[in-house]
Amino acid sequence: MSVPARFDSRCITRRTAWRLALAASGLTAVLGAHAAIPLALAPTQELPGNYEGWKHGEALAMEGDVLVLGVPSADQSNNGTQYQNNGLVIVYRWRNGRWISDAVIGWSSMGLIPQNNARLGAAVAVSGDLILIGCPGCSGTRPKAYLVEMPEPMQAVHWYPVQPDLDSPADPENGIGASVAIADDIIAVGAPRATFGNPEFGAVAVGRFNGTSVVWDDPLFGWENSRFGHAVALASTSLSLPPSPRFSLLVGAPQYVASGGFGLAGRAALYEKYIGGTWTLEQQFANPNPGLGDGLGTAVAIYQPHVDDTAYIALGAPGRVLAGSPAAGTARVYSLSPGDADFVLDTEVQHGTPAFADRFGTALALHGGRLLVGADGRAVDLANDAGSAYVYQRSFNAPTFSYEWKPKQTLIPRGGGDGTFGHSVALGPRAGAISAPLHDGSNGNSIDIGSIQTYLCDGIFATDMGTTADYQCAGP
């Protein structure tokens, strides 16, 4: 395997040429078709963990009425032997006005013996009936990821092993499967420590699920020691013209160091492909004024359901220094208007009172013009690492004739404590979820059982004037 050629940003990309052609033909609107303004979030239901040290919900994914929780620190016994950190995944569905546990996915589902430090569920993603699960600590003959098909109404659960052809040292934190993404039948599996001999360039394996197995494309490789693939996000975009759809892959490399620079500036790259085509590098997102340990790309998110909608990208930099406070953190948000060639920076968001080790930007989720940001180190009521999450909404500012990302809500853990609320976040059109994996049990004796707080949109939060039938959400 050879080291890939250096990226060349001077060439005009396929997307650029395609968009220019559309703009010239008058087939795209200048402002695009904007979805309804999303509503704010009201607490709905807590999903607490059950066992000490399991850190319930270290990873989260949501789509429609499905909520997936990764529990990679879960232990399991088998024939009298206790296996540590072998991991499992819990799938919830929205039924009768509540999130109901639908399935527990673990080694027993496949009839396999648990494995120490496998960390099944370290990363999770969902699209339709398919759930993609990372297993970066899996060793031996066990693959580094699994694709699970769970049709609704519930029938047989089908497992499909996913083993990317990547050279990466066994590492339960940053090995193959440390990040995953799925859109329709396209999957991405991150390997932040993938190597070419000694140097670790990081890589992402991408492929298409054909119903029985994954057909792999050529892997994508990053920059030396950059942890390329630490975070990945996929979007499936419907087009006004064939071929349809187009897939966009966003990859974070939080340990990237700029040439001649110092410190972990971080970086991200955007790739696109059509069915039957190859992945093409479309755009890179650099850190223009990096600090010592910004880590831009620690978390990434992308949203674009249709080519006539405005698209958004968010990149978290939880290590960024603000107001003299190390690791206060920020998030950079980009937009792409219909007909434009490239994403442009909208703003760099942060909450109003940044403090030491807030880690704002450690987790991100986008849906339409709404952004949910986790800050799992934020102190709340004198409790360090209690964590918080922040909701931003993109709205038009008439005086400046421009769009702005305005703070909408601050969400804090309802039970207090030091549970790292905001470690993982998920967002849908009418629902959200935020994890606190270090949350302790209500009796104070169950350490680090973890907890998930779920939300639905509610008019009283959106209007401050009470709820109405038009604004209440019956489900996600």
Image: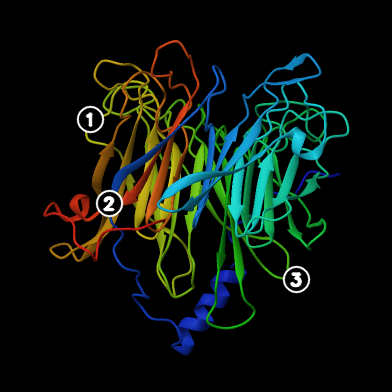
Total marks in image: 3
Q: Nearer the viewer, residue 193 or 342?
A: 193
Which residue is at the far front? 96
Residue at the (27%, 36%) spot, across then down? 351
Is there CB contact under 8 Å for labels 1 and 2? Answer: no
**Callout 1 amino acid:** Thr
Residue at the (36%, 50%) spot, across then down? 371
Q: Nearer the viewer, residue 196 or 459?
A: 459
**Residue 110 figure quarter:** top right
Residue assigned mark 1 = 353
Is there CB contact under 8 Å for labels 2 and 3? Answer: no
Residue assigned mark 3 = 276
Vertical order, 30 against 461 (above or below): below
Instruction: Find residue 41 and report its horizontal and vertical position in percent.
Output: 30, 48
The quadrant of the image that shows the N terminus is: top right
**Callout 2 amino acid:** Ala
Residue assigned mark 2 = 40
Answer yes or no: is residue 259 visible. Answer: yes
Query: Could you tell me which secondary element the residue under label 1 belongs to?
Result: loop
Instruction: Find residue 32 and report its horizontal and vertical position in percent.
Output: 37, 75
Answer yes or no: is residue 205 visible. Answer: no
Instruction: Find residue 130 and report its horizontal and vertical position in percent.
Output: 66, 55
Q: Is residue 96 left or right of residue 384?
A: right
Report the Cα–Cα distance between label 1 and label 2: 21 Å
